[in-house]
Amino acid sequence: MTTKPKPATDLTAIAPADGIVLRLEALGIDHRAADFPERFVTFCEQNDLYEMEVTAEGDLLILPMTGYRGNKQELYMSTFLTNWEMVNGGSASSQTVRFRLSSGAVLGPDAAWITQERFDELPNDERETIIEGAPDFVVEICSRTDNLRPLQNKMAQWMAGETRLGWLIDARLRQVHAYRAGQAEPQTLDDPEILDGEDVLPGFAFPVRRYIFDI
């Protein structure tokens, strides 16, 4: 059973325009159940041609492909973050990792990082399936298939889940929206050359102009 994505005026809507939305409740699936993470990961592995997320309301989102350029942008971001992690600690992840927020949403950022303390305390089942709680740092990149509003709504959900620093990178407009814990609105940066990890990732610098805007 399919339904259309919610209109962009709904501030909770995170479905991209070309995404497919399935109501899990209609299929008898409780996305808040204790065994859902394991079942969801198994389902994703059996359908590995698709990227999937789950909204707080229990809608399964089947996401469109990002394409070659979008994949390169995600790869560069994850590579820089992983290189920083290898020196400074914590745990970086790419777009294939999912996090379950207290709202029930199961979301995947384009890149993320959690502290070493959080990583060390992760139970084995979360390391194998879905991590409970939002990342400390999160990146979303607006690809060719994305509209900005759903990603802004998604960033708001990350920040409500206690992410401390987030970057929403809009390659088409050459802008970065920097989200910080405790700030009501993000800061918009026009065509920045380098992004700074601030106090969340001290010393982390990502050349966003070279590896995102100019690809």
Image (cartoon, rainbow, N blue to C red):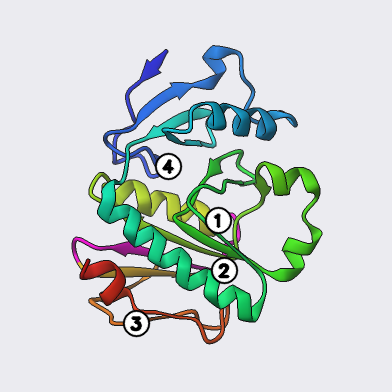
What residue is shown with label 2?
164
Residue 11 drawn at (x, y percent): 38, 45
Q: In front here: 72 or 158? A: 72
Give the SS element for disc 4: loop
Q: Amino acid at mark 1?
A: Ala
Q: Amino acid at mark 4?
A: Thr
Which quadrant of the rendered structure holds the C terminus? bottom left
Q: In front here: 16 or 193? A: 193
Res 12 label: 4
In-image side of 56 versus 177 (left or right): right
Above or below for 107 versus 209: above
- Report the mark closest to the observer, 1 or 2: 2
What residue is shown with label 3?
194
Give the SS element for disc 3: loop
In-image side of 112 versus 32 (left or right): left
Q: Earlier in the sequence, mark 1 or mark 3?
A: 1
Q: Amino acid at mark 2?
A: Arg
Q: Residues within 10 Å of mark 3 (few under 14, many from 20)?
A: some
Res 160 label: 1
Work out how far the residue at label 2 is from the one at label 3, CA to CA, in angstroms.
Answer: 19 Å
Work out how far the residue at label 1 is from the one at label 2, CA to CA, in angstroms.
Answer: 10 Å
Residue 23 drawn at (x, y percent): 48, 21
